Amino acid sequence: MNENVESHFSWTSRRVVLPHCSEDRKKAGSSGLVMDCRPIPERPDVRLLVYHDDTDDSDYDAVAIGKTDGVNDIPVLTTSEECLLVAAARSRTHPAIVLAAPPGDDLSRRIREVTGQILRGGPLLCLLVCTGALSVLVPLHSSVSGDR
């Protein structure tokens, strides 16, 4: 079993180790990936990924910022779907993955839903696998009062 050399502990996030072997990655990821492009010419380090899940016939969107392939402990952030590219354009140079959160007014509930989907497995986990990350840090709850 592959173990991460780095360790992480936080009261606000949890580490999720993503599948490492190529067979697991292929099974979990690429079959539903319908888009992987670089939408901001000024930011070649930004990738827009769209994953389609046939089970619920839904699309899941994410923006990978910076080098994510083969990297551990990449923070997963959430925002509304309309703000994905704005969040990417405003981001720092450190790697991060921004997921489009489900619609709704309660930010804490949306973050819990995203985190639950990632921890249980499913389309959002498959989408994260498509970024090439080895492990991600998912929020356990919201520490902010709203989207920006």
Image (tube, rainbow, N blue to C red):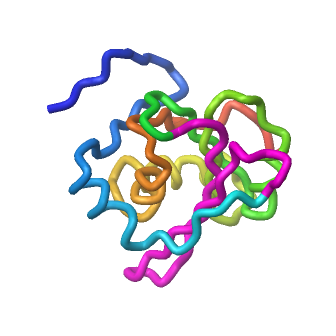
Q: Which residues are magenta?
A: 40-68
Q: Position of residue 132 (x, y in %)?
A: 44, 46
State the image quarter where residue 38 is shown.
bottom right
Q: Position of residue 91 (x, y in %)?
A: 78, 36
Q: Is residue 27 left or right of residue 32?
A: left
Q: Is residue 147 visible?
A: no
Q: Nearer the viewer, residue 105 or 147?
A: 147
Q: Residue at x 40, y 59 (%)?
A: 126
Q: Is residue 138 left or right of residue 42?
A: left
Q: Position of residue 32 (x, y in %)?
A: 42, 73
Q: Position of residue 140 (x, y in %)?
A: 51, 36
State whether residue 68 is above or below residue 4: below
Q: Is residue 24 left or right of residue 86?
A: left
State whether residue 59 is above or below residue 7: below
State whether residue 11 is above or below residue 82: above
Q: Is residue 25 left or right of residue 96?
A: left
Q: Which image quarter holds the N terminus?
A: top left
Q: Nearer the viewer, residue 131 or 112?
A: 131
Q: Is residue 60 a member of the stretch shown in magenta? A: yes
Q: Residue at x 27, y 42 (%)?
A: 20
Q: Is residue 61 visible?
A: yes
Q: Is residue 103 a member of the stretch shown in magenta? A: no
How many numbered marks are there?
0
Q: Nearer the viewer, residue 52 or 114?
A: 52
Q: Residue at x 69, y 66 (%)?
A: 103
